[in-house]
Amino acid sequence: MITALPASLMLALIEESLDAVLIIDDACTIRYANHAMHVLCGYAIGALPGSSVDCVLPEAAAAQRRANDRHRGNGAFGKVGESVLRHQCGEQIPVEMKALDLGMHDGTRYFGAFIEDLRPRRRMEEKHAELMAALERQAMTDPLTEIANRRSFDAEAGQMMALGWRRGADMAVGIADIDHFKKINDDHGHPVGDEVLREIARRMIAAARTTDFVARIGGEEFGLLFPDTSSETAIGVAERIREAIATEPITTAANKKLAVTISIGLATLPPGTALDEALGTADCALYKAKDGGRNRVESL
């Protein structure tokens, strides 16, 4: 037969537990708090026993408890789940409580709780959420120009199309291509070509309307989305974007001034039209702009 362990061993275990442990009586007086409980709420060791449990409850919870009958109003300590405690300095501490009714002893009812500080878990969850958001941004962003990429373009187009079609509104799509970009790379090197791509992306974003969407969808190709936009209006916005590139040379880091132009092909996307179909039409319009001498906007 196994001999029962002395209560002092169990008390020592509870005292050294990483979880906070609290015992209160039916008058809501703290009768026991282990070392972790004192540290959690910022009190000197031994300061909590004899105090009202209100000292570790948020003001609103303490006021609610006082408004209830003391023998029935044990508030958060009668539940299992997440709650909040109050640090001595006033900080709100999110915790998970595992509460127990310890029953009667010498005519007094006692309640106990194991309490876990949720702040480390919350910080880890926040870091995980931030990491996932950063990874999602990276997955949707072109690393060279730092604007949206093709994946982001397709996703945005789907949302714009669904929203516009519910309202019965047309939208326009466009493909912009840098004229003679291969020659820029051949004559000046790929690092200069990268500078040109970044500057063109910046100018296109600046010239577009706030409701428009610009993405790099290929080597020297950019996709354009114009929501709630007629063909005529899209042509006007595309001309403004084209002029923003053509009217001022691009100055490189080596102080070279390069005259760069773009050609743009546009297509309307009426309700029911597939994005790939509209992009195919815009691509045909782009070839028409190239054949017409470049530095042009064409719409089909």
Image (cartoon, rainbow, N blue to C red):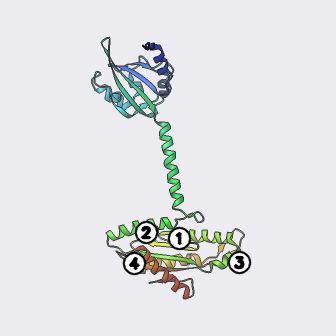
Instruction: Describe the element under mark 4 as helix, strand or loop.
Output: loop
Quarter residue 273 falls in: bottom left
**For mark 4, what is the residue?**
230
Instruction: Compare marks 3 and 4 and give the one earlier in the sequence.
Output: 3
Query: Are discs 2 and 1 less than 8 Å apart at CB?
Result: no
Instruction: Compare marks 2 and 1 and give the one earlier in the sequence.
Output: 2
**For mark 3, what is the residue?**
187
Instruction: Compare marks 4 and 1 and give the one earlier in the sequence.
Output: 1
Nearer the camera: disc 4 or disc 2: 2
The answer for how far apart the CA atoms under marks 3 and 2 are is 36 Å
Instruction: Compare marks 4 and 2 and give the one earlier in the sequence.
Output: 2
Where residue 115 sits in the image (x, y, percent)?
43, 29
Q: Residue 157 carries which label?
A: 2
Instruction: Compare marks 3 and 2 and give the one earlier in the sequence.
Output: 2
**For mark 1, what is the residue?**
217
Query: Are discs 4 and 1 less than 8 Å apart at CB?
Result: no
The answer for how far apart the CA atoms under marks 4 and 2 are is 16 Å
Residue drawn at (34%, 75%), measured in percent from left and top?
272
In the image, 294 versus 271, the foreground residue is 271
Instruction: Describe the element under mark 2 as helix, strand or loop.
Output: helix
Q: Residue 104 carries which label?
A: none
The answer for how far apart the CA atoms under marks 3 and 4 are is 40 Å
Residue drawn at (53%, 73%), measured in percent from left and top?
222
